[in-house]
Image (tube, rainbow, N blue to C red):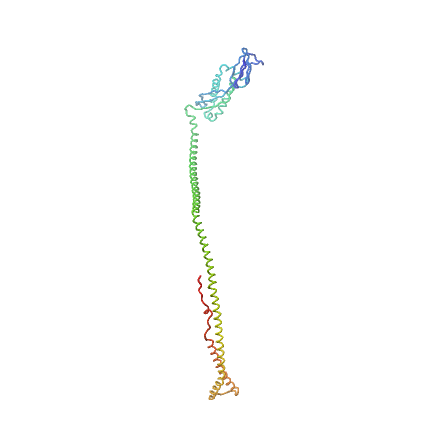
Amino acid sequence: MFGYRIPQPDEALLISGRRSRDGGETPFRIVTGHGVFVVPVLRRASTLTLAMQEAEVDEDCYTTQGLAVHVRAVIAFKVGDDTDSITKAARRFRRDQRQMPALVGRIFSGHLRSIVGSMTVESIIRDQQALAENIVGASKPELARIGLVVDSLQISQIDDKDIGYIAALAKPHQAEVDKAAAVAAARAAQQAAAAEQESARNQSEYARQTAIVRAQYQAEVDAEQRKAAAAGPLADARAQQAVIEAQQEVARRNAELRREQLTAEVVRPAEAEAARVRIAAEAEADAIRRRAEAAASSDRIALEQRLIELLPEMVRAAGAGLGGANVTVLNGATGLNEVVAQLAGQGSAVLRAVLENLGSDERSGPEPAREEDARPRAQLEP
């Protein structure tokens, strides 16, 4: 729209050509963040940047020790967001806003030389943050008077221009750092060597375990292959063994059957015949014994009768023998009777002796056939 102006987010719109409504000293209207209608011819609008800007400081300073140090710093600043700061900055920099970084750099250079001159090199090196805060604190009032504010100040470099003082300060620490670095490197090397040895041991152990497992697997595979290879012959052997066992069983049964046949055909008839022969032999032997006993009994009876008949003659002969003998008989008739009794007893003894001899002769006669001789002998062949 003609005459309607909208400032950028990082800009302030300055409208001049009218009197301030509040009667203040601001000779123009400040608009930020929204648009406004500017009457042509009667009003004039211009912009002031509110964006962040950068200024550099590169100064040679002398410390309280009289040593020259070179300091380089970077300052980030901008125009303040309040109306007073915008008014102050607009009055000073609206025509040439590029002057702001140069002016800020000069302001900070002066304060930097002043603050570094009150410090030693050691304190500057050790506490750069305090140095930056001191410079910002000293510069704030001056910057506020021209409508600027500092967001940050960073010291990027501090050196002594080849004097060697800062390097000398760093040497002890550098030596400690080098020593610590060497120790750390040695420890790292030792740990690396230990780790490498441990890795080698682990790899060897893993290889050993792998070889063992592989050998076990191979042994199992070989065993299964041998089992598979032997399965056929083993099955044939088992089948052959079963056939042999069946043949043996058949042979055993045939032998039993043949044995039973032989028993029925040969042994039983032979046993029957042997029993018949034994019974016959026993009967014959018993008959012979009975006949022998009968004959012996009849002969003994005849002999006894004969001896009885001869006994008186024997007594008479004994008496005749005593007829011429000189015998003294004591006890009278009693003694005579005793002599006669003795003679009669001698005759009886002679008779008994004869009878006993006769009986022994009869007993020592022919023996009957033994039963085991009468049995037929049969040889059985299976």
Name the foreground residue: 337 vs 184: 337
Q: Where in the figure is residue 29, as x and y percent of width and height?
A: 55, 14
Give residue 274's position: percent from left, percent from top. Answer: 47, 67
Where is residue 302 drawn, in percent x and y?
Answer: 49, 81
User: Quick one: which residue is furthest to the front in this view?
Assistant: 265
Q: Nearer the viewer, residue 227 or 279?
A: 279
Q: If the image is split into quadrants, where does the N terminus sit?
A: top right
Question: Which quadrant of the view contains residue 18?
Answer: top right
Is residue 328 depicted above or below 256 in this figure? Answer: below
- Which image quarter is the C terminus in? bottom left
**Which residue is most to the top?**
41
- In this view, 230 is above or below 257: above
Q: Residue furthest bottom?
A: 324
Most distant residue in the right direction: 22
Position in image of residue 269 (x %, y %): 47, 65
Q: Is residue 331 above or below residue 171?
A: below
Compared with 165, 193 (above or below) is below
**Number of labelled discs?**
0
